[in-house]
Image (tube, grey):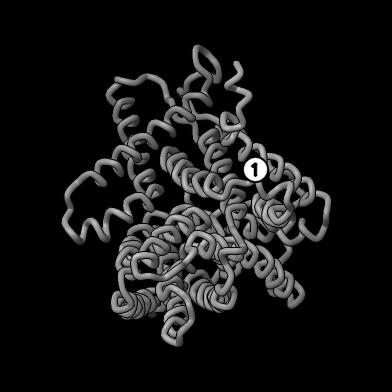
Amino acid sequence: MSSFANPTAWAWLIQFFIIVVAILVANLVRCNVPLFRRSLLPSALLAGLLILCLKPLDCFSTLVDKQAMEVITYHALGLGFVSMALKNKKIKSSTTTLKVVETGAVTASTYILQGLVGLLITVPMFLLGKELFYASGLLLPMGYGQGPGQALNFGVTFAHWAEGQGLVFHGSDFGLSIAAMGFIVGSIVGVVYMNILRRKGKLKVRDKAQPEHYSIADYESEGEIPHSESIDKLTVQVCLVLLVYALVFLLMYGVQKLDLGQFGTNTLKPLVWGFNFLWGTLIGVLVRWLIGRFRKRKLMRREYINNFMLDRIAGTCFDVMIVAGTAAIDFNNLRGLWLPLILVCTVGAVATFWYVLRCCKKLYPDYQYEGFFSMFGMLTGTASNGMILLREIDPRFETPAANNLVLQTIPALAFGFPVLLLMGFAPQSLGNTLITMGIMVAALLLFGLFIFRKRKMKK
C-alpha cells in the first residue's frame, strides 16, 4: 500500500484536480460577476486564464505540469471529435443543401484568409531579420479557426521543423496563445458589436424569458438500452468512444511503421499524429454506420448510441481541452514573440470580422446578423462559442443559422482538407511557404467567385 503514497502515482490526477477546481471557481465567478457574465467568455477559458495567472506563484508553479497539460489537450480534442462523430445525425433542418455547402465554403475560405494574413506578417518579419519561424503565421487559422487542440498539434510540428533548420521556435506556446486570444476576440468583440447594432436599432432584442420545453425524445430515442441494467448506459457510451480512439491509435501507429519514402517520412508521417481528430471523425462515422447496418439486419436488437450522453461527453472533452490548452502556455517561451503574436492576432481578428460579415450579408440576406454571430464565434473560438453568441439574438433557433453551423462540418472538411495538407508542406522551407502563399491566394479567389457569384432572383 505504501506505493500509493508515492506522489508519482497521483501525478496525472493532480493535473485533473487543478482543471476541475479551476472550472468550478471560474463558473462561480462568471455567474456572480456581471462583467464576466455580459462578456460571454466561456467558463473554461476563464478557468484556463485563472491557472495561467497563478502559475508565476512559487507555490503553484510546481503543481502545473506543462507537458501533462499539452497531452490532455491533445487527447481531449480527439475524444471530443469521436463523441460527435458517433452521434446519430437526425436533424430536422430548416436550411437547404446549397446553403450548407456555401456555409462550408465560408468556413474553409476563412481558414485560408487567416493563414494568408498570418504569413503576410511572419514571412516579412523573418526576412527583415526577426528571430521568428517564417511559417508560424499558419498557426492563426489553427488557433482561431480550429481551437487549442489543433493549435497545439501543429505548433509542436512547426517547432520540430524549425529546430531542424537551426531556429528556436516554441510553437506550442505560440499556437495556444493565438487560440486563447481567439476566444477573447470572439466573445468580447462579438458582444460589443451586438450592443452597437442594438443601439442603432438594426438588431431586434428577442424574448428569452419564455422557458424551453424538452420531451423524452431529446434525451433518448426509441429502442435504446436501459439506463442501468447489467451495465450503465453512460458506461456504454464511454466504451464506444474509447474503442474508436483505440482504433485511431492503431491506424496512426500502423502508418508510422510503413515505408512511405522521403516524402511520406518528411510530410505525411508528422501530419498523421496531428490529425487524430480527423481519423477519430472518420472511424467514428464508420463505427456508427456499422452499428446501423447491424440493427437493420437484426444482428443488434437494441440501440446502443445515445446522442444526449455523447453530447455531454464531447462538451466535457472540449471544456477540458480549453482549460488545459490555456494552462499549458508558458510566457517565458514567448519572449521575443510578443510583437508578431499581437500583430497576427489583431490583424487576423480584423480580417476575419470583415470577411465573415461580407459573406453573411451576401449569403443570408434574411438573417445576416444571426449568421454572422454564429460563424464569427466559431471561426475565432469553437462551434459552442458560435452557438452562445447566436442564442443571445436567436434563443429558440428560429432562423436556419444554427442548422447551417451544425451541418456545414462535412463540406468544410472536404473544402479544407487540401489546406491542412499544406500545413505539412509549408514549414519545410521558405520556398515551400512562398508557394503555399500563392496557392492560398488562388484558392481564396476561387472561393470568392463561388460565394459572391450572382444569384438568380426568385419571382
- Whether residue 333 appears in this view of the structure is yes
Question: Is residue 198 placed above or below 300 in the rendered structure?
Answer: below
Q: Residue at x 77, y 75 (%)?
A: 199
- In the image, residue 328 sits, relative to residue 453, either above or below, namely above
**Quarter of the rendering occupied by the N terminus:** top right
Classify 98 as above or below 125. above
Among the 4 quarters of the image, the one containing residue 34: bottom right
Q: Residue flagged by tag 1: what amino acid is it?
A: Ile
Q: 44 or 357: nearer the eye?
A: 44
Q: Where residue 311 sits in the image (x, y, percent)? A: 53, 39
Q: Quadrant of the rendered structure where residue 341 is?
A: bottom right
Judge whether 14 appears above or below 329 on screen. above
Residue that mark 1 sits on: 19
Nearest the eye: 254 or 440:
254
User: Which residue is at the front of the view, 59 or 116?
Assistant: 59
Identify the residue shown where x is 49% and y is 68%: 140
In the displayed structure image, the side of residue 115 where residue 210 appears, left or right: right
x 61%, y 38%: residue:
16
Horizontally, residue 407 falls left or right of residue 391, namely left
Please state if 80 lies on the left or on the right of 266 as rendered.
right
Quarter of the C terminus within the rendering: bottom left
Q: Is residue 105 left or right of residue 152?
A: left
